[in-house]
Structure formats: C-alpha cells, structure tokens
Image: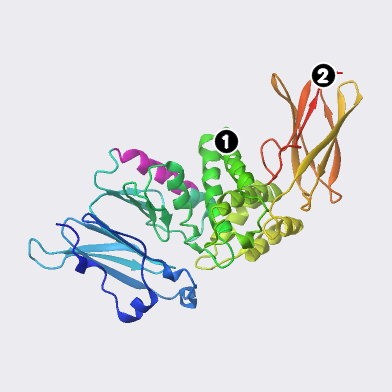
Amino acid sequence: SGIPVDYVASLPAPLKAALQGFFRPIQTTDLLEYNFASFFYPMPPCVRNRAWTWETELTVPPGFSAVANGRFTAKRPASESADAPWIWTYVGDRPEMACEIIVGKFDIVDDPGVDFTVHHFFETGVVKDTAEPVKFARDCYSYYATTFGGDFYRDPIVVHLRPRPMISHCISYAVLYTRERAVLAHEMAHLWWGSTVKQNPIESSMWYEGLAEYSVMMYSRTRFGPVEFLKQLSMSNARWRRADQGPYSFRDIRQWSPDRALGYVKGVALFRGLETVLGPEKFGEFLRKLAAKKDEFPDVQQIREICVGLVPTCDWYFRNGFMGLGSFDMEARNAVKIGPGKWEVTIRSVGMSEWRAPVTIVVRNASGQIAATTVTIPREGKIVAEINVEVEEFDILVDPFEDIPDANLSNNVIAVRPK
C-alpha cells in the first residue's frame, strides 16, 4: 500500500544524535523525503575532514527508487523472494552539510555528457515529456563545468517532484518542485556554489545564493544573447531596489533572517558589478579559483582575497560593495554644448559609496542608439566626458546596461531638447 513506516532510515545512535530531527519532511504513500538539515547550524568542524567516506544503504519496497547523498553504485534485492525489498547503495567521499533521503516511484533517465552523466529521477506521472528538461540540464551543466571547472560532481542527480508547497533546493543533489528552467539552472549552479564549495551561512547567504542566481544569467547570456541577459538582470535589480530599503549590509542578510530573500537579488547586483570591475577575463579566472576551493567554507573576506590577488586595485569595491552598504549612485549631472555636434557631460558618483570603475554612456533618440562611450570614474568621483552628437534632441543615459549596482536610477538620464 506504499512506504511502510519501518522503512525510514535506521541510524546508529551517534548519527541520530547528530541528526537531531528532519527538515521539510514529506511522507505519503508514494513519496518519502527527509532532509536532515540540523547539520547546517552550527557547522560541525568534522565536515572539514576531506578524508572521510561513507556508504548509505536504503532498503525500500519493490517498485520504489531511492536517492541519497553521494554517488549511486548498486541496487540489489534483499533476498531471492519475489516480493523482497530492494537495497540501493550510495557512496560518498565529500563532506556534506546535511543528509537527504528521497524514496518514491520514479522514471529514471541517465543522460551522459562529455565529462559527466546527469541522473534524472522523474516522479512518475509528473513530467509528460522528459526530453526537454534532460536536454536543458545537460547543456546548462556543460556550460557550468566548462566555465567554473574545479572538482565538480561527475554524476549529478536531479529529482523532479510534483508541485508542492515546498522549496526547491540543492545540498548534494537538486530537488525541484517546479518545471521552471531558471530554477533548474539555479539549483544546478549550487552544485558548485554551496555544495562543492561549501556555503558559509554564519557569514551570509548572499554570496552563494547571489552567485548561483548570477550563474543562471551568465548561462542565459551565452545561450540566448545579451538582450535576454539584460532583461533578467533588470528584473532582478528592480526587485533589489524595492527590497533593499536601509540598505542592508551583507552581514545583515543571513540564512535565518527575514531579509534572506534579498540576498539573491542583491548578490546578483554585486556580482554583476564585480564582473564590471574585474573585466570578463579576470572575472572568469576568479570563478575558477573560487570553484577550486573544494570542501572549503569561504566567506566574503576570502572571496575578496581572491579578487585582490587578481586585480589589486579592486579593494575599494569590496569595502563599498560586499563589506559596505552594497550600493552605489551614478548621476548624470549636466550636459553642455561646446561646439557644433560636441557636448560635454559631467558624470558623478554620489552618495556614501564611491564608484571608481568603467561607466558606459549611451546617447539615444527616437531612432535608437546614436552614440556610446565608456569612461572610468577617477578617485575624486567625477569625470567630464565629451560626446559627438549631430542631432538636437536626444537623451543621455548613464549605465543603461546596469553594469553597476546602482540603487537609484532616477538621476541617470539627461533629456536634451532644443530651446
């Protein structure tokens, strides 16, 4: 009639003491999920031990599949009886911060890539066409593996469950309660940011949630183009500006705080700004260096050290951004005509946090973009840029592509109209 209660994992007493209960439990006749998340708080020092290994055996009724932390190695019947339960075995060699167990009736699809195989567990009857999510997951994971590198999971698992009032998540494998591709891409990014490289919730949830979310946008930029990337970035930044009233420093956006959700969108803005400060090539190098910290628990200070090692002059960004209020304010001050078709535009960084990196200036009229230039704001926080414009009616836009975590867009535009 379903999953008997006595099939719930029988744990040795020391492990039971460590797993003081479970989080987000589901137990129905067709599905059982236990997420032993008390490993998260406090973070036990033992998970820093890179030498440990473990084996998980899940004994389940015939016809059911089992998922656990680690790499699937075997399944076998417990006896020769036709109605004997089956034993699924998973082996792990990575320190995990929580133990998750899922048992249910699944359609299993193993999808090999170049250097990995994605193992999909589709709850029976939930996804009619499995080809699309399988193809998307392979392409997305391939992009992450190529872009981030590191000692990533070669046998990632994605569990596709029917919609429930639960939160999709990823500890050592992805668990989805939605069919949205962006959620799948976000949770797969956590196999790097939060799983291979461990999250540090004592510091902040912002870096690993924000970087996972920005990873989705990076993938979207590569596969679907800059227009889709800017659309996603602008939507995320709009949510950040609405929510970040304070603003809150990264230390105030913790895993257990009411403002935890702000960490996603504020993290996106800050990592976009970091890519602007470092430049695309150095930013890619930063991601690969961060991904190399397998099984470590980096905080924002360690992330700063990586970036300063690549670009020593970027320290101001961490003081004002990640370690400060985390927002800037660019102002298009005025525009003065200095000759036929020549204008001087004054751009300032105002407010408490100074921006000292490239800023894009675009000139548009009713026909579209007619001029563009990039300037770098010096230490004094102001620069006068010269632009060539032959028309008499146009708009000057500062940072139109939202490369800067600018909390105030109301002063980014100058409308030039004939007198």
Q: Tag on residue 342?
A: none
Where is residue 294? Give x, y as percent.
51, 65
Q: Residue at x 46, y 57 (%)?
A: 191
Which region of the structure is painted magenta? 129-143
Q: Amino acid at mark 2?
A: Glu
Q: Residue at x 66, y 37 (%)?
A: 401
- Taking depth in this image into account, of 416 and 166 the one nearest to the observer is 166
Residue occupied by mark 1: 231
Where is residue 392? Give x, y as percent.
82, 19
User: Is residue 4 found inside the magenta-colored segment of the image?
Assistant: no
| Image quarter hosting the N terminus | bottom left
Q: Residue at x 69, y 62 (%)?
A: 309
Evaluate if marks 2 and 1 touch, with contact meaning CB atoms under 8 Å apart.
no
Q: Secondary structure at mark 1?
A: helix
Distance of mark 2 from mark 1, alpha carbons? 30 Å
Tell me the chief SS of the magenta region. Answer: helix
Q: Secondary structure at mark 2?
A: loop
Residue occupied by mark 2: 392
Quarter-of-image position of residue 367:
top right
On screen, residue 46 versus residue 176, left or right, reads right
**Label 1: how many residues lie within 10 Å, few (<14), some (14-19) or many (20+)?**
few
- Say which label, 2 or 1, has the lower sequence index: 1
**Label 2: how many residues lie within 10 Å, few (<14), some (14-19) or many (20+)?**
few
User: Is residue 142 found inside the magenta-colored segment of the image?
Assistant: yes
Q: Amino acid at mark 1?
A: Lys
| Image quarter hosting the C terminus | top right
Where is residue 276? Give x, y as percent.
68, 46
What residue occupies the far left of the structure in this picture? 81
Where is residue 177? Give x, y as percent.
37, 48
